[in-house]
Each structure stands twice: as structure tokens, then as C-alpha cells.
Amino acid sequence: MDLSAIIMMIIAIVLVWGGLVAALIHLRRNPDPEDPDEPAGTAQPGPGYQ
């Protein structure tokens, strides 16, 4: 494998894993809000669920 291919592969891996880490950090700092009309743990499946 050429040196340029190895460098491109390393850059791609860093971008993918870096994006995953950034998304996890963002979700930790800004969690999705809970639905205030529904008590915790009582979510019903959507239509079409059997």
C-alpha cells in the first residue's frame, strides 16, 4: 500500500471515529427532552406494531 493511501485511510478513520465521539459528547451535554404528557417508562409502540 502506498504512503498516500495509508495517510488517506488514517484521515478517514479519524474523521469517522471523531464524528462518533463528537456526537456522543453532544448527546451527553444536550439529551433529548422527555415527553411531558407521558409518564416515564410507559411509551406505547407506534402504529403497525403487533
Image (cartoon, rainbow, N blue to C red):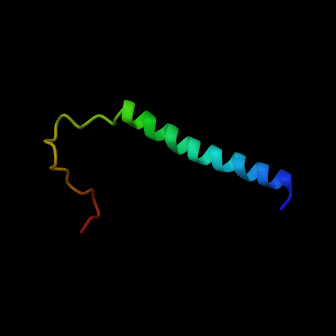
Drawn side of residue 2 relative to residue 47, left or right: right
Is 49 rendered above or below residue 8?
A: below
Which residue is located at x 16 percent, y 37 percent? 37
Drawn side of residue 16 relative to residue 49, left or right: right
Which residue is located at x 25 percent, y 37 percent? 34
Q: Quadrant of the C terminus?
A: bottom left
Is 6 rendered above or below residue 26?
A: below
Which residue is located at x 20 percent, y 54 percent? 44
Pick whichever, 4 or 40, lies toward us.
Answer: 4
Q: Quadrant of the N terminus?
A: bottom right
Position in image of residue 42 (x %, y %): 15, 50
Pick whichever, 49 or 39, lies toward us.
Answer: 39
Which residue is located at x 71 percent, y 49 percent? 10
Position in image of residue 12 (x %, y %): 69, 49
How many labels, in total? Answer: 0
Pick whichever, 33 or 27, lies toward us.
Answer: 27
Please, which residue is most extreme toward the top here? 29
Drawn side of residue 35 relative to residue 13, left or right: left
Position in image of residue 21 (x %, y %): 50, 41
Is 29 rendered above or below residue 20?
A: above
Please identify the quarter of the rendering in which residue 29 is found: top left
